[in-house]
Amino acid sequence: MTIDFEKMGGLVPAIIQDARTRRVLMLGFMNREAYDKTVETGHVTFWSRSRNCLWTKGETSGNFLNVVDILNDCDQDTLLIKARPDGPTCHTGADTCWNEKNTEDTLLFLSELSDFIEKRRREMPEGSYTTKLFSQGINKMAQKVGEEALETVIEATNGTNEQLIYEASDLLYHLIVMLASKGLRIEQIAEELHRRHDPEWDKQRRLAKAAGTMK
């Protein structure tokens, strides 16, 4: 990775982002030595401008920032470091240096689950239930989605909320597997729903149908 340390007199800004929640945690500065140590140890290390020395975040508190990925910007003079924090990031005890709660948006897990299922599809490890589903083919997967949909309906009409959540989770998982088998992702379903949320969507749909351009 080529980093332009000279533009700011040997330093570059390093934006720290929680790899899971995507919340920005803090901003620090790195010189070449701090960057090299970060890569070597896997713990985010900065150059302290006030103390004029290296400091590894968490070296006294234990709240390390564990590196997941490091990205360089288009001008090669600003780093985005995705990390997993061991605890609060700010010295005040707050989750972030802007006093924000670093809570995870659990909806983001659907993308993570899609990544995991796609990985299963590529690698097809033995003993995996997801592998078994892919091995059975699209017809069996579609049948399984139908079965899970029926069980979800039954719980909605005659079951408990707890069981409804359980069955709906099964349905969503099998739907994501079926989408993956067709080269699709759950995000595309979200995009379609987002498009339909546009107040003009139904009007455009009716016009397209009238023009004969919609099946």
Image (cartoon, helix red, strand yellow):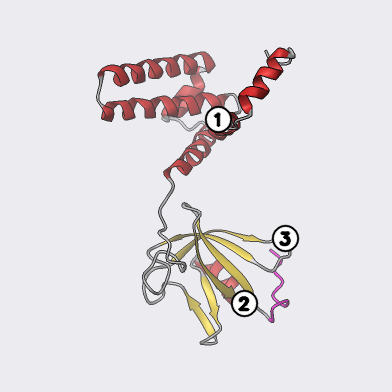
Using the image as rendered, state which of residue 40 and residue 206 is in the foreground: 206
Q: CA distance from mark 1 to mark 2?
A: 45 Å
Q: Secondary structure at mark 2?
A: loop
Q: Is residue 212 left or right of residue 163?
A: right
Tell me which residue sits at (49%, 27%) in the image: 177
Q: Secondary structure at mark 1?
A: helix
Amino acid type of the residue that numbered disc 3 sits on in the rendered structure: Cys
Residue 202: % across, % down = 61, 23
Amino acid type of the residue that numbered disc 1 sits on in the rendered structure: Leu
**Quarter occupied by the C terminus:** top right
Determine whether 58 is above or below 109 in the image.
Answer: below
Would you call the spot at circle 1 few (<14 residues within 10 Å), some (14-19), or many (20 or more)? few
Using the image as rendered, state which of residue 139 and residue 162 is in the foreground: 162
Displayed quadrant of residue 154: top left
Determine whether 212 is above or below 198 in the image.
Answer: above
Q: CA distance from mark 2 to mark 3?
A: 18 Å
Give the residues drawn in magenta, as a range: 1-9
Using the image as rendered, state which of residue 119 and residue 102 is in the foreground: 102
Displayed quadrant of residue 89: bottom left
Residue 33: % across, % down = 60, 77
**Quarter occupied by the N terminus:** bottom right
Amino acid type of the residue that numbered disc 2 sits on in the rendered structure: Asn
Q: Which residue is mark 2?
A: 31
Tell me which residue sits at (27%, 30%) in the image: 162
Tell me which residue sits at (45%, 41%) in the image: 107
